[in-house]
Image (tube, rainbow, N blue to C red):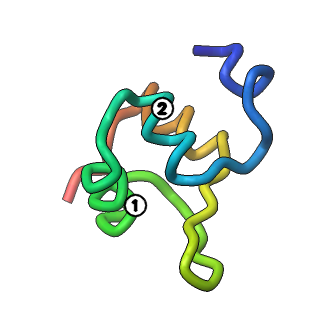
Amino acid sequence: MNNLAEKYPDVIDVKTLCAILHIGRQKAYRLLQSDAIYSKRIGNTYRIPISSLQEYIFNGSPEK
């Protein structure tokens, strides 16, 4: 997964997040809305830094 930053741009969208994690759009939005993966909402779209996705993959979701 180290090549994730090399393969994708610094900031990805939900469609790309779904493709990387092999999940559906609804699950992706749940992850973003629960702050399991840091994202920034701009208008109606979410922008996800690739570094926050890497952190989620390596460390898992934050404990609540």
Residue at image mark 2: 19
Q: Going by the image, does 15 lie left or right of 21?
A: right
Q: Position of residue 39 (x, y in %)?
A: 55, 63
Q: Name above or below for residue 43 compared with residue 64.
A: below
Residue at image mark 1: 32
Task: Tell me which amino acid carries mark 1.
Answer: Leu
Residue 55, disc: none
Task: Tell me which amino acid carries mark 2.
Answer: Ala
Q: Going by the image, does 14 lie left or right of 47?
A: left
Q: Name above or below for residue 39 compared with residue 57.
A: below
Residue in view at x 51 percent, y 52 percent: 14
Q: Position of residue 11 (x, y in %)?
A: 72, 50
Mark 1 surroundings: few (<14), some (14-19) or many (≥20) residues within 10 A = some
In front: mark 1 or mark 2?
2
Q: Earlier in the sequence, mark 1 or mark 2?
A: 2
Relative depth, front residue between 58 and 12: 12
Residue in view at x 34 percent, y 51 percent: 25
Are the residues flagged by discs 1 and 2 in contact, CB closer than 8 Å? Answer: no
Name the quarter where the N terminus is drawn.
top right
In terms of secondary structure, where does tag 2 sit? Answer: helix
Q: Quadrant of residue 5?
A: top right
